Image: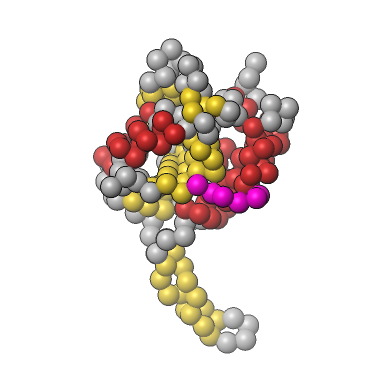
Amino acid sequence: MAAKLIVLDHPLVACHLTTLRDKHTPPSEFRQTIDRLATLLAFSATQDLATADAPIETPIQKMVGRRLLNRIGMIPILRAGIGMVDALLNMIPTAEVWHLGVYRDEATAQPIRYYDKLPAGAPVDVAFVLDPMLATGGSAILAGQMLQDWGVKKIKMLSIISAPEGIARMQEALPNVEIHTCAVDRGLNELKFIVPGLGDAGDRIFNTTG
Ligand code: PRP
């Protein structure tokens, strides 16, 4: 069975996405908008997190609240995924952040792995892979495979915009990885860029468009 695909259908998502796609949006506003959309993706992707009883005392009386039960990992794919980390950490302050360096070769569009420090020890229980863009799916699949090799049982991909080609590849290669995205665009152009897309998220976040 193909992995679950959750596309956020919400007016706030649609409006923030418009800001993100607009080529006139400056890097500071682009970063802020990535942060807002990543927060909304976090809300979607965390709905089934397990919780345990947490006995507390309010100023009025004792009660039993909830606390997160599992070890949660944020896995930003460098560079652009870094732009989504703060939003997720804001929601789950106890999460661990494990960076993966993967860039897409400009000529071949193949993912090239250049950094990872995943520990040899016990894996996190749930991993959220963070990357604003899922284009051919190569980078996300590589990240997902690295996390599976680490032993992570539950992996979720959080992508702000996605191409149908990348989603299909990912669903085939990693049928257990849930995909949460704000938009599924028309497709990829001859350079394997998402159309209509938003350009290069990493360059727009870090103001390196030249
Ligand atoms: C972009 C993007 C994804 C990848 C998506 O990164 O942030 O990581 O390409 O493409 P794919 O689905 O075809 O693999 P890029 O290689 O431009 O690196 P950067 O984040 O350092 O800019």
Query: Which residue sits at x=42%, y=67%?
Result: 51
Query: Which residue sits at x=47%, y=32%?
Result: 163
Residue 29 in the image: state x and y as whole percent: 71, 36
Q: How is the image coloured?
A: secondary structure
Q: Is residue 149 above or below residue 40?
A: above
Q: Is residue 87 above or below residue 135?
A: below
As rendered, which of 11 and 178 lies closer to the eye?
11
Using residue 44 as the reference point, say whether residue 152 is left or right of it: left
Using residue 53 as the reference point, say whether residue 148 is left or right of it: left
User: From where the camera sits, is residue 88 visible?
Assistant: no
As rendered, which of 76 and 173 lies closer to the eye?
173
Residue 101 in the image: state x and y as whole percent: 43, 29
Query: Which residue sits at x=40%, y=15%?
Result: 108
Query: Which residue sits at x=63%, y=39%?
Result: 17
As rendered, which of 152 and 56 lies closer to the eye?
152
Using residue 162 as the reference point, say whether residue 174 is left or right of it: left
Residue 140 sits in which quadrant?
top left
Q: Looking at the image, how many numbered discs can be counted on the residues? A: 0
User: From where the camera sits, is residue 51 visible?
Assistant: yes
The part of the chain drawn in magenta is 7-12
Magenta-span inclusion, residue 160: no
Name the quadrant of the C terminus.
top right
Residue 60 sits in which quadrant?
bottom right
Residue pushed farthest front?
186
Residue 137 in the image: state x and y as whole percent: 40, 31
Residue 164 in the image: state x and y as whole percent: 44, 34
Residue pushed farthest bottom?
61
Residue pushed farthest top?
107
Using residue 32 as the reference point, say whether residue 144 is left or right of it: left
